[in-house]
Amino acid sequence: MAISLHTLRSALGAKRGKRRVGRGLGSRGTTAGRGQKGQSARSGVGGLKRLGMRSLMLATPKLRGFKSIAPEVQAVNIGVIAGKYIAGEFVTPSTLMKKGLITDKTLPVKVLGSGDISVAVTVKNCAVSASAAEKISKAGGSVAV
């Protein structure tokens, strides 16, 4: 049989088993890696206190305020849409991103009513304010859900 790395074995008695310390009556009665007496040798001491990180944790300033988990909505005004779109086009998050009006097509988009529009466009997959919907329908466009 050829010798290769996966067939090599250590000699009998060359390896010793791991000492199971502090695991009940059958184990060796040592300190189990906790040193000698004291607070950190007793049970019920928190890991941060034992590791010496408690003072560091108390000295670190807390983050104040509130951060919402709701995604940030990207707003686009219809005045800007009127300048970038031609009649009959669809206004979707992907077309808005291609035209450089939004930065991320996965985030929600809302069309707002600032400005005027004379181009008949169809808005899809975007939230639309009431004033924007009114101006789009006056221009001959529509708002699809």
Image: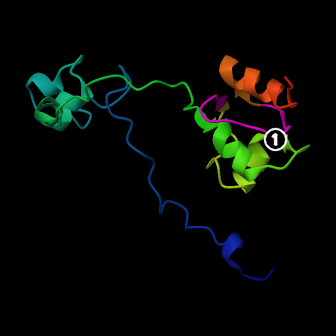
Percent x, y for residue 75?
A: 59, 35
Give left or right: position of 89 versus 68: right
Q: Determine the residue positioned at 30% across, 32% down.
A: 28
Provide the secondary structure element on which disc 1 rests: loop
* Quarter of image, res 50: top left
Magenta segment: does it hold 121? yes
Image quadrant where one finds the C terminus: top right
Magenta segment: does it hold 114? yes
Is residue 112 depicted above or below 101 in this figure?
above
Q: How many marks?
A: 1
- Extreme residue in the right direction: 88
From the image, tell me which residue sits under label 1: 119
Give left or right: position of 43 versus 104: left
Percent x, y for residue 69?
A: 51, 25
Residue 126 visible? The answer is yes
Report the magenta residues as a range: 111-125
Q: Determine the residue positioned at 75% across, 20% down.
A: 134
Image quadrant where one finds the N terminus: bottom right
Is residue 112 depicted above or below 44 in this figure?
below
